């Protein structure tokens, strides 16, 4: 069975759950949820950008099965630019799951959340931290998985799937367990641009001379260094060599100026147009939608690009692709080395370190071995197989 949680954190959370069970005893519901007549539903999902894209099928399914309900999403701030205008969420309430919290900020968040009395609060990830937060929400029913504990805080405990599945499938399984019917049309994440966004893209294509060109997007960055392949510069040169009617869009995220510049320069040296795109999240989504194909690390880029219709090549380091790759019927090409015993890994930095200097030297991180084993040739060959 695929490992889903960091075993060290799981051990800690089980101890926390044992302590919570002494003080909290939520009465369990006896009746099924009445989604058809629900008027207010709270969903808690504080995931990263890719996680938010993967939540789209769940939110679509919930909307279809609870047609009268207004959905409030308790989330990180980046969820709004991704989901706004998709017709899935009526109200966003923000909190930062990674910021050092204060009681004042905690109280402020829950004052906003609890201006409404909810028919149900749903936490479809089974994360004990957010199950605990949900306990303080004003809701008749509080529903979640119970992977790492929290049953004492819930009115409805959802039994997890028998085997670990993709994050999208896991949330759709959750939807079925609360009484939803899942339609085939809702199973895959899809992002729709507004009329204004489409017009801005048309203007961008004209102004940059991209009308007759295949646009290849490359985002060399990632949220964590451990997920960041360091050979996009070489890959761009190989893709550009001898290419006709091709242009590159190089996406630069926060702190990624050097990687973006080097990648763009590698393409330009081959005589190919390369535009560096440095924008906010809304325009980032728009410009990914311009691309015919996108090369990226295990990050939100692949999820957004595929949801917008592009073919994506995703380079995976320590994370298990079968669990978190962009979810689609086709046109998702994974580059991953699965031979290492330490994979999947849930760390924020690689354990493989070397000593700098002689005696008494400080450990210095080296690039993740999972990524070191993925060659430019391997990625390029997969590209050639797709493009013929």
Image: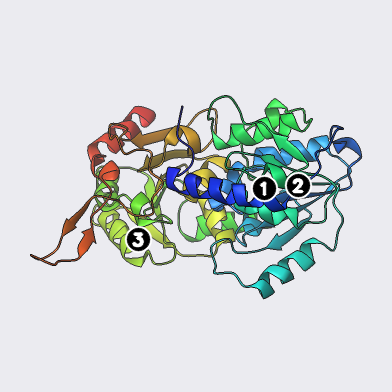
Q: Where is residue 321 in the image (x, y as percent from the top left)?
A: 43, 35
Residue under the image location 59 percent in, 69 percent down? 101
Mark 2: secondary structure: loop
* Disc number for residue 25: 2
Which residue is the site of mark 3? 260
Disc 2 or disc 3, which is closer to the eye?
A: 2
Q: Is residue 363 left or right of residue 157?
A: left
Q: Position of residue 218 (x, y in %)?
A: 39, 50
Q: Which of 185 and 55 is in front in this view?
A: 55
Q: Nearer the viewer, residue 202 or 367?
A: 367
Q: Position of residue 75 (x, y in %)?
A: 65, 57
What whole-number distance in Å separates the C-alpha atoms at marks 2 and 3? Answer: 52 Å
Q: Position of residue 274 (x, y in %)?
A: 36, 57
* Disc number for residue 21: 1
Toward the front, the furthest residue is: 22
Residue under the image location 53 percent in, 59 percent down? 204
What whole-number distance in Å separates the C-alpha atoms at marks 1 and 2? Answer: 7 Å
- Asked whether the viewer can see residue 101, the reply is yes
Mark 3: secondary structure: helix
Marked residue nearer the N-terminal end (2 or 3): 2
Q: In which quarter of the image is residue 386?
A: top left
Marks 1/2 in contact by CB < 8 Å: the verdict is yes
Residue under the image location 72 percent in, 47 percent down? 153
Marks 1/3 in contact by CB < 8 Å: the verdict is no
């Amino acid at each position: 069975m695929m490992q889903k949680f960091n075993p060290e954190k799981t051990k800690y959370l089980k101890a926390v759950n044992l302590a919570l069970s002494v003080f909290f005893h939520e009465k369990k519901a006896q009746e099924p949820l009445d989604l058809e007549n629900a008027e207010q539903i709270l969903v808690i999902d504080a995931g990263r950008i890719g996680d938010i894209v993967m939540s789209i099928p769940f939110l679509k399914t919930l909307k279809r099965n609870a047609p009268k309900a207004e959905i409030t999403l308790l989330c990180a701030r980046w969820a709004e630019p991704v989901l706004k205008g998709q017709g899935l969420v009526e109200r966003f309430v923000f909190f930062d799951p990674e910021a050092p919290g204060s009681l004042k900020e905690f109280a402020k968040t829950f004052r906003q959340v609890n201006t409404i009395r909810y028919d149900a609060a749903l936490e479809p990830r089974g994360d004990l931290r957010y199950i605990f937060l949900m306990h303080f929400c004003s809701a008749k029913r509080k529903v979640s998985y119970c992977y790492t504990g929290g049953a004492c805080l819930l009115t409805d405990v959802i039994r997890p799937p028998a085997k670990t599945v993709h994050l999208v499938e896991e949330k759709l399984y959750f939807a079925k367990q609360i009484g939803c019917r899942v339609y085939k049309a809702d199973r895959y994440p899809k992002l729709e641009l507004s009329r204004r966004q489409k017009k801005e893209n048309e203007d961008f294509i004209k102004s940059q001379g991209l009308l007759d060109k295949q646009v290849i997007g490359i985002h060399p960055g990632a949220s964590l260094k451990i997920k960041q392949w360091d050979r996009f510069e070489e890959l761009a040169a190989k893709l550009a060599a001898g290419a006709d009617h091709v242009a590159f869009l190089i996406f630069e995220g926060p702190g990624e100026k050097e990687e973006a510049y080097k990648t763009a320069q590698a393409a330009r040296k081959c005589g190919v147009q390369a535009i560096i795109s440095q924008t906010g999240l809304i325009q980032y989504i728009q410009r990914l939608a311009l691309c015919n194909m996108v090369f990226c690390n295990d990050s939100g880029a692949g999820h957004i690009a595929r949801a917008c219709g592009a073919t994506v090549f995703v380079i995976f380091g320590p994370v298990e692709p079968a669990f978190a790759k962009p979810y689609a019927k086709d046109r998702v090409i994974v580059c991953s080395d699965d031979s290492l015993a330490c994979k999947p890994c849930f760390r924020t930095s690689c354990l493989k370190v070397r000593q700098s200097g002689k005696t008494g030297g400080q450990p210095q991180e080296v690039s993740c071995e999972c990524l070191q084993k993925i060659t430019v040739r391997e990625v390029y060959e997969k590209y050639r197989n797709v493009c013929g």
